[in-house]
Amino acid sequence: MMTTVVELEIPAPRLGFARTFDRVSTFEFQIGGLVGGSAPLVWTNGPDHETIAQALEADPSVDVIGHPTGRLLNEREGLDVDVERVATAAADHQTALEINANPARLDLRGSAVQTAIEAGATITINTDAHSPAAFDQMRYGVHTARRGWAEAADVLNTWTAEEVRTFLD
């Protein structure tokens, strides 16, 4: 069985728009990620505070929110995200939250992983590999998941193919 995966980058000005991904609904698996050139990507106080959760609520086609805070270690602070609200919205809409295992990101943090799990969200670990050698970074994501007290049942990567299909449907 062949699976098509696409990572969709959400430009900060469009983050809160409904149906961000309606043009790519034919893909089997969609990852929505925050992108931007400077910190912060989206101000998370005032009217923009809930934009990530609103995007999750507005677009059921997204299966994973990638690197949810958008941080780059030693380069860019991540968003000050209300992890509990985002995790609750993710759980309600069967959207997983990614731990990006790239050592330059390690996003979500361990404490955010724990908050997400307590809110009922599913976690997935991604290496953000841009070359085969980068697959070795998976261990950093596993360590981060462990710091957040994640167990195998909390991590999409550990599920059977049938369990993943059920989650995605």
Image (cartoon, rainbow, N blue to C red):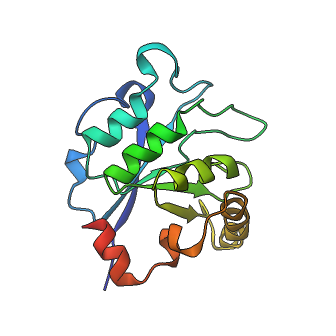
Residue most extreme to the top:
46
Q: Which of 41 and 166 is in front in this view?
A: 166
Q: Going 38% across and 59% down the picture, which residue do you hit?
A: 6
Picture quadrant where residue 167 is located: bottom left
Q: Which residue is farthest right?
A: 74
x and y percent of residue 121 in the render?
Answer: 46, 55
Q: Is residue 61 left or right of residue 66?
A: left
Of 4 and 145, nearer the camera is 145
Asked whether residue 155 appears in the rendered view, the answer is no
| Image coordinates for residue 107, horizontal then vertical, percent | 63, 48
Residue 135 in which image quadrant: bottom right
Between 6 and 88, the one lying in front of the other is: 88
Residue at 34% x, 57% y is 94
Q: In which quarter of the image is residue 166?
A: bottom left
Please state, as top left, top right, bottom left or bottom right, where the N terminus lies in the image: bottom left
Name above or below for residue 163 compared with residue 64: below
Location of residue 148 in the rendering, given as x and y in whole percent from the top left corner: 67, 57
Total number of numbered labels? 0
- The residue depicted at 59 percent of the width and 59 percent of the height is 128
Q: Looking at the picture, how far across and down is residue 114, in whole percent?
A: 62, 53
Classify 18 as above or below 60.
above
> Is residue 134 something one can see in this rendering?
yes
The residue depicted at 42 percent of the width and 45 percent of the height is: 88
Quadrant the C terminus occupies: bottom left
